[in-house]
Amino acid sequence: MQKVFMISDMHFGDENIIKYENRPFENAKEMDDRIIENWNNTVSNNDKVFVLGDVSFYNKEKTTEIIKRLNGYKFLVIGNHDEGNTVSWWKEIGFDEVSRYPIIYNKFYILSHEPLYLNENMPYANIHGRIHKLKYDSKQFFNVSVECINYTPIDFENIKLLIV
């Protein structure tokens, strides 16, 4: 049975993010290796992963190498640090599907890089990244930035239990 996972803000190769977000790594290589290991220990090749932006700070060749190592069918919602590259560029490096814009998943969950405006009268929940450690008090939002999910893709079924 296929499982669905979510993750955001891996920032592969970004030495600065370790300092800015107090990530528990000595350097980008250690960070990259841990995220890749956690991903592949969690996700099978039959599973689907929604990556909600900010993938890599490496060049095309190194980013391709990393993405090809990651298990599963990979769907990217482009983040603010990914925008310099085209949809076709992201597909060439190994993503199976790519969207420049937020998507609605299962008719209820809005998957986006940045959190979107919602209020309690709106019939949606927003699964997002971008803000790294911040979590909203509202159960309509769930942050899948790696810092919030132990640097490991999180099962969509677990997210559903925690929101709305």
Image (cartoon, grey):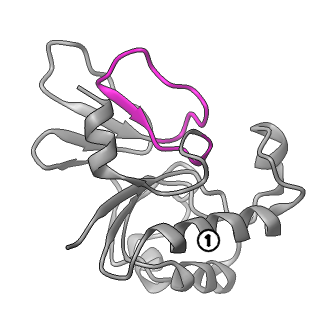
The residue that appears at 54% across and 78% down in the rendered structure is 67
Considering only vertical position in the picture, is 163 above or below 1? above
- Please indicate, yes or no, whether residue 57 appears anywhere in the rendered image: no
Magenta run includes residue 135: yes
Magenta run includes residue 4: no
How crowded is the residue under tag 1: few (<14 C-alpha within 10 Å), some, or many (20+)? many
Left-right relation of 144 to 151: left
Residue type for callout 1: Ile
Which quadrant of the figure has residue 64?
bottom right
The residue that appears at 20% across and 73% down in the rendered structure is 1
The residue that appears at 45% across and 20% down in the rendered structure is 136
The spot of residue 144 in percent (x, y) is 47, 44
Q: Which residues fall within the magenta stretch?
A: 129-147
- Please indicate, yes or no, whether residue 74 appears anywhere in the rendered image: yes
Q: Mark 1 highlights which residue?
A: 36
Tell me the element at label 1.
helix
The residue that appears at 51% across and 78% down in the rendered structure is 70
The spot of residue 124 in percent (x, y) is 18, 30
Main SS of residues in magenta? loop
